[in-house]
């Protein structure tokens, strides 16, 4: 069990170790503003920590979705353990399909690692990494009220120009925060063989963005907020 100290209070997280939230989740809650009474959805909720954060921060209702039954079971248990089960529901299904809306806020920290072939559904985002991100932008645009917000976590290895072009179509987009994320060739090739060579090819094609300096390889993790026009 992990106890997270967040800007709005402590959140208890339990679940299978491979499903627990990570540095990207903490980065997101550190910069996420929830408005009192927001109707919130979190597609790809995992163990539900960001959904629980939204409820603690004053959301009127929160729906988290995931395709992974084990993650959903942990999320429901975490809602009970944090005494938030009356304001947070977890539903099985893809992205925002189980959430008809209307919504005021969508928070999306989704799999978006580019790879030459499908691998672990917690990480794989398609050939250039953008499949789920572009889909969720379109779904959120259809469910958010005017003035509603989509907060999107985006690593620079996942063709950021393509994602932002899609995001700009129906949203006014601003960057909330960014940070450097170091990585190694071995880290990515452990996820799926040949992933780093694939990333180099995507960079050569003008899609993935990452660099190397004296400290090693790194890309940039960014959090964006789009306001529905
Ligand atoms: C990187 S984890 C992030 C979990 C959570 N948002 C967090 O910050 O801790 C991505 C999650 O997306 C889920 N996922 C993958 N494809 C999905 C889809 N099409 N619809 C809903 N969830 C999906 C995975 O099962 C996994 O739980």
Image: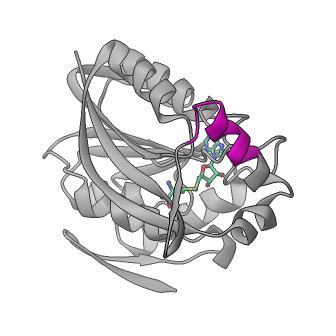
On screen, residue 194 versus residue 65, left or right, reads right
Indicate whether 62 appears above or below 122.
Answer: above
* Residue 120 seen by the camera: no
| Residue 190, percent from left and from top | 80, 67
* Residue at the (43%, 75%) spot, across then down: 81
Nearer to the camera, 58 or 149: 149
* Residue at the (52%, 56%) spot, across then down: 211
Residue 149: quadrant of the picture:
top left
**Magenta residues, as a range?**
198-208
| Residue 112, percent from left and from top | 60, 44
Nearer to the camera, 54 or 174: 174
| Residue 202, percent from left and from top | 67, 37
* Residue at the (42%, 20%) spot, across then down: 165
Check the image and name the residue furthest to the left: 36
Nearer to the camera, 108 or 165: 165
* Residue at the (71%, 66%) spot, across then down: 185
Q: Quadrant of the C terminus?
A: top left
Q: Is residue 202 magenta?
A: yes
Nearer to the camera, 142 or 131: 131
Indicate whether 115 appears above or below 194.
Answer: above
Magenta span: chief secondary structure: helix
């Amino acid at each position: 069990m992990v106890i997270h100290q967040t800007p709005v209070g402590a959140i208890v997280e339990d679940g299978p170790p491979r499903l627990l939230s990570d540095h990207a989740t903490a980065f997101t809650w550190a910069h996420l503003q929830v408005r009192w009474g927001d109707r919130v959805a979190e597609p790809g909720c995992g163990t539900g920590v960001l959904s629980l954060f939204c409820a603690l921060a004053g959301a009127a209702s929160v729906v988290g979705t995931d395709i992974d039954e084990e993650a959903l079971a942990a999320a429901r248990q975490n809602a009970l353990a944090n005494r938030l089960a009356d304001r947070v529901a977890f539903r099985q299904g893809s992205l925002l399909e189980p959430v008809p809306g209307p919504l005021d806020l969508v928070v999306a920290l989704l799999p978006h690692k580019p790879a030459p072939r499908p691998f672990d559904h917690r990480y794989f985002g398609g050939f250039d990494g953008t499949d789920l991100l572009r889909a969720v932008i379109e779904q959120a645009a259809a469910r958010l009220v005017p003035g509603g917000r989509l907060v999107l976590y985006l690593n620079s290895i996942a063709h950021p120009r393509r994602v932002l072009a899609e995001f700009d179509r129906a949203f006014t987009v601003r960057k909330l925060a960014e940070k450097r994320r170091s990585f190694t060739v071995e880290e990515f090739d452990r996820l799926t063989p040949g992933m780093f060579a694939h990333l180099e090819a995507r960079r050569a094609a003008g899609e993935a963005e990452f660099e190397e300096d004296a400290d090693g390889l790194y890309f940039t993790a960014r959090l964006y907020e789009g306001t529905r026009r």
